[in-house]
Image: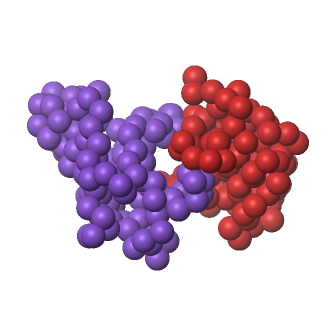
Amino acid sequence: ETGVTQTPRHLVMGMTNKKSLKCEQHLGHNAMYWYKQSAKKPLELMFVYSLEERVENNSVPSRFSPECPNSSHLFLHLHTLQPEDSALYLCASSQEQGGGYTFGSGTRLTVV
Amino acid sequence: QQQVKQSPQSLIVQKGGISIINCAYENTAFDYFPWYQQFPGKGPALLIAIRPDVSEKKEGRFTISFNKSAKQFSLHIMDSQPGDSATYFCAATDNYGQNFVFGPGTRLSVLP
């Protein structure tokens, strides 16, 4: 375990479903991130939270909705997704003043 | 200017050989350059990182070479082993280690 835990590990959902991805970090970090990893594409930054405030959106479709209730937890709420949203969704955390990211193992999402 | 270019896309090396992955950037404000290693089913994990005040950093079999004037940096894996088979991402940031820009990744296969 890296100290960043993501659940579930795998998720299959229909286009009309609503689901949530969860991320929890036990490292005392104060910044958390959602990334999307698709085949043959660079890691795409979706959302950044620093000290529980969202600092970047990166033009992510509104069908993805993040929530950061405290510095240890991060959620990604999903609704009416499209098949092209199928990907590995990675959560990461870091200290605000550097040191690199610690990633979770990701949630493999399949939209059918 | 925010891109990080990475090559090759894939690399096959014999056991005991040297694996070399190259990255290039444009943004001269970047001041932290990590490399991440990702195994299938796992999130990326920080492997080694460098700041532009040094030209080389070595940790075990892994070495980063950094050329500030050329805005290039590379990862060298000496005595490559089958267990090194993974996808490697270079990254860069100018924001105290937050909001990385990732390269597209290199899939390394080390043959036994």
Give the residue at the far front of this rendering. Answer: B53
Residue B77, how many percent across, how many down? 22, 39
Identify which residue is drawn at 35% across, 55% down. B53
Position of residue B12 in the picture relative to residue A68 (left or right): left
Quadrant (top left/top right/bottom left/bottom right) for the N terminus of chain A = top right
Say if B54 sits above or below B44 in the image. below
Identify which residue is drawn at 40% across, 44% down. B49
Is residue A15 visible in the rendered structure shown here? no
Residue A57, how many percent across, how many down? 73, 65
Colour-to-chain, purple: B
Position of residue B102 in the picture relative to residue A5 (left or right): left
Position of residue B47 in the picture relative to residue B84 (left or right): right
Give the residue at the far right of this rendering. Answer: A69
Identify which residue is drawn at 29% across, 42% down. B57
Q: Quadrant of residue A101?
A: top right
Residue B55, how many percent across, how many down? 26, 53
Q: Nearer the viewer, residue B38 or B97?
A: B97
Q: How did the renderer colour the structure?
A: by chain
Residue B92, how many percent across, how many down? 46, 58
Give the residue at the far top of this rendering. Answer: A1
Q: Colour of chain A?
A: red
Q: Quadrant of residue B5?
A: bottom left
Instruction: Please give the count of numbered marks on the rendered protein.
Output: 0
Is residue B61 visible in the rendered structure shown here? yes
Q: Quadrant of residue A25?
A: top right
Identify which residue is drawn at 11% across, 37% down. B17
